[in-house]
Amino acid sequence: MGSFPDIRWDFLGKYVEKFIKWIDTTFEGFFDFIHLISSQTINGIDSFLSFIPWWLFLIIIFLLGWRFKSALSGVLYAFFIFLIGTFGLWDVLMITIAIVLTSVVISLIIGIPVGVWMAFSKKFSIIMRPILDAMQTMPSFVYLIPAIFFFSLGNVSAVFATLIYALPPVIRLTELAIRNVDEDVIESAQSFGSSRWQMLTKVQLPQALPTIMAGVNQTTMMALAMVVIASMVGAKGLGEQVLIAINRIDMALGFEAGISIVFLAIIIDRVTSGVANSFQKHRGS
Amino acid sequence: MKRKLFTLLTVLLLALVGCSSEGSSGDGEPEKLDKIVLADAGWDSIRFHNSIAQRILEEGYGYDTEVTVGSTPATLEGLRQGDINVYMEVWTDNVKELYKEMTDAGDIEEVSTNFNDNSQGLYVPTYVIEGDEERGIEPLAPDLKTVEDLKKYPEVFPDPEDSSKGRIVGAPTGWAVNETMTAKYETYGLDETFSYISPGSDSSAVATLVDAYEKGEGWVGYYWSPTWVTAKYDLTLLEEPEYNEEQWNKDFGTAFPPNDVVVAVHKDMPEQAPEVVEFLKNYETSNDLTEEALNYMNENDASAEEAADWWMKQHEDIWTSWVPEDIAEKVKSSLE
């Protein structure tokens, strides 16, 4: 009676499937290139982090905490990292940090220009908004499969999947920040005869920096939230440990790896928001 | 700030749910069952066997049935708790420790071996060895027969992360068999010329295979049959020395021993539904019989239920021997 009429449009999913396969074969070389660069970056960061002696790493964490929060926080953060080491997860922690850092850096390289463009072009902004919504709400398992097609198993697919989820906040907040730069400031800069480029780099971006930093903070947290899902395409790191724990119903390992991710999240969140605050203060003075 | 942490924590909690569903089921006398819950751990053959069992339980024994979907560990945990009553395909080797723990504690009971003539190991697409004239693929590794032969052909299976090596797609992360595969990888001396990567999940492994298969490229990885993958894609299992226990216990340097795929039930089942347990004790198929159904599903785009109906019509003699005659009659009439 009230059931849906017998209309079946099944071309959309199939079309997307064909499209993905077409992209895969047509741009194979391009993907290989991206693959090469990203895996070099991840490996580079990872071997750099593994090269640093553990105590130096703890000191760096302490200094970061001290500089952007307080001495006490610094001690606490260093202790967190120390704890992760005692779980026997030191090496996988470094891989996770490498993957998260790479994802965040690429997010910023793509996200900030896109955000700036959206702030300047209303049309582009209208087009991009639903795309950003889709990126954030599309269940990540759906794009894990194309990720494997493009980038094969491993860390690069993980970064790709992480990017899709972690990019939107930095784009949105960059757009918002640039739009909200005080009219008066822009007018006075104009009256001094600044060019458009000068306006952007010397006035708008610095003014917008605190908000953009809030975006960076969110993007980093989202990247961290993806580590477990990313390990489903073969990424190593803490996420892989969680996955192993799930597959074996190993509560102990699950908790250790899980709490390590929480520790890492707390540290990254506090430090990046501390950075954002210090920009805020600079502007205030 | 709090919100972000909250999101992160939620994700982690969700991830940990699999590890923490302990102890809510009540004690005391097991109640009579009016609904039997089966486990669907996500692959096609278990769905097919579920559908056969459901048909017989519903039409023959008059039970309501329900299927609970979840990952292997989650559904096994459900079986232990009694939220799931029947598990048609436990791949005992793949969950060895957990399964042993559960049967030793008497939480679950093994009632029969569904089949144990399945195969597993390292597969390559057949065109890698023989080529494929239709698709214009030259044989990439014409003399590849055994796992050890792989050593001659690392360049056929290039690792995108390390161009000097070949790559073996291993068993999914955290599966017990992954450790076996890593050991074999070293035993056969493949570690010099190959890297070994564990895909995070079964579907990730299949995705790499499908990608390579459609491009006609080399691929070597762990898989097993019966599955829709081995039914749909023309794959060849690389040979290993014949199984012998001594060698296996030393370094896994032989073919896999038969992996018992068993039917298991919750510990209360024999009391709750003795006639059902009686039926399940007789439940026995084989690799080929199962793969027939998987093939049917694949070729006709059929559901597991349709495949089960088709299969039961084809093999009446097999399943009617599992149940008393009157039950068989009832089921038979429902199939027509």
Image (cartoon, rainbow, N blue to C red):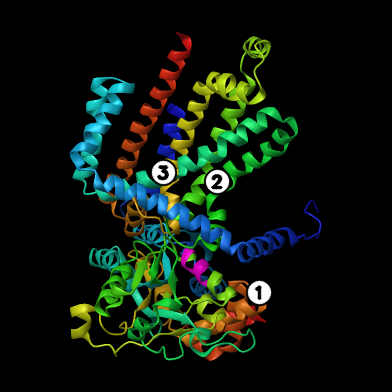
Question: Which residue is pictured at 36% across the width and 53% down the height?
Answer: A43
Residue B18 in view (yes/no): no
Out of B256 and B213, give the one closest to the viewer.
Answer: B213
As drawn, the label of residue B301 is: 1
Q: Is residue B69 left or right of residue B75?
A: right
Q: Closer to the observer: label 1 or label 2?
A: 2
Instruction: Say above or below: B14 vs A116.
Output: below
Q: Is residue B277 left or right of residue A174?
A: left
Work out which quarter of the rendered image holds the C terminus of chain B and state it.
Answer: bottom right
| Same chain letter for marks 3 and 2 | yes
Q: CA distance from mark 1 to mark 2?
A: 32 Å
Q: Is residue B206 magenta?
A: yes
Residue B105 lies, in percent from the top left, at 23, 63
Count residues near mark 3 (Cα–Cα under 10 Å), then give few for <14, some for 14-19, many for 20+: many
Out of A114 and A84, give the one closest to the viewer.
Answer: A114
Question: Which residue is pictured at 46% across the width and 16% down the height?
Answer: A280
